[in-house]
Image: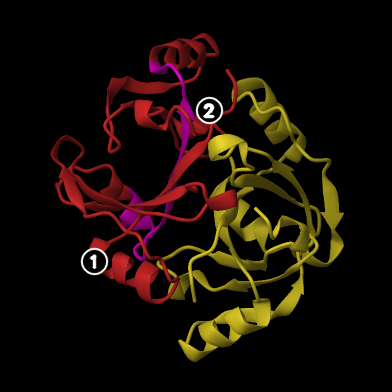
Chain colours: A red, B yellow
Amino acid sequence: MKLGRLNHVGVATPSIADSIAFYRDVMGASVVTEPFDMAEQGVKVCFVHTPGAGGTEGTQIELIEPIGESAGIRAFLAKNPAGGQHHLCFEVPDIHAARDEFLAMGKKVLGEPRIGAHGTLIFFVHPRDMGGVLTEIMETPKHAAGH
Amino acid sequence: MKLGRLNHVGVATPSIADSIAFYRDVMGASVVTEPFDMAEQGVKVCFVHTPGAGGTEGTQIELIEPIGESAGIRAFLAKNPAGGQHHLCFEVPDIHAARDEFLAMGKKVLGEPRIGAHGTLIFFVHPRDMGGVLTEIMETPKHAAGH
């Protein structure tokens, strides 16, 4: 495995609308994507763009608000009512190869690869095996291959 | 204020040596800087480089281990013994202008600007005013101005 781009930092919030206002008005973000529901995960998400080096696209902030009663993110917000950093997402070129590598290293991979918020396959690895950091592994979108 | 580059994600760890081994052996990092002590903050830190888009330098992971008895990071590790995400650090062109803006917005700025791990001036803003995210604001290093 070769360390890939840090695609985004997931940040949980009790109100995606308030967090969007915060990133626009306090932090000065100019590009925030339209929030959309990921019904299966019970969450509403959107992405705050940050500038990368040399005019490239930087690591995004993914804002995550629970919408379903059973969303795992509810437990996180119960412990952190104001919200906070929830996970890190790194890109890989091949999601299935990455999953095999994590499994071979004895890491607790959470479920089969599924379509994530960027439309490519993702999976999560349990924080207990990852230095306390809930880690998302995401296949690089094909249109970004030249990045 | 205009949202700047996400310079790094701060990750607390009970053992910087173990975390370096993790990022090298599990995540496949190829560049990890030599750890050094920041005695005044009571921490030892180093940076894991991640690749940005188009061959640029990406957002770094700052590994942080407490070395002093009074390090604030000890409280974090008491709650999160395995380690975990501790703060986000965004770049600004002018640290004093940024501090004035945060103060004018009524945000709790933690102390005067001081030299941070990258050798430029930094300050922190309290998470209670920042959607639960402890936020570091860092003046962009001059050598990186062309990035």
Discs 1/2, front: 1
Residue B144 figure quarter? bottom right
Picture layout, residue A101 above or below residue B125:
above
Position of B137 compared to A82: left or right? right
Q: Quadrant of residue A139?
A: top left
| Of the pair A35 and B39, the residue shown nearer to us | A35
User: In the displayed structure, would residue B137 be above or below residue B62?
Assistant: below
Q: Which type of secondary structure does the marked residue at label 2 adopt? A: helix
Measured Cα–Cα span from mark 1 to mark 2:
33 Å
* Amino acid on which disc 1 is placed: Ala
Does the segment drawn in magenta span residue A91?
Answer: yes
The image position of residue B84, as x and y in percent, is 55, 45
Identify the residue at horizontal 76%, vertical 74% (top origin): B114
In the displayed structure, does residue A80 sit left or right of residue B82? left
Q: Mark 1 points at which residue?
A: A17
Residue A129 numbered mark, or none: 2
Residue B28 locus on image (x, y percent): 63, 23
C-beta proximity under 8 Å, tags 1 and 2: no
The reply to whether residue A18 is visible in this rendering is: yes
Viewer-proximal residue among A75 and A89:
A89
Whole-percent x, y for residue A78 in the image: 31, 56
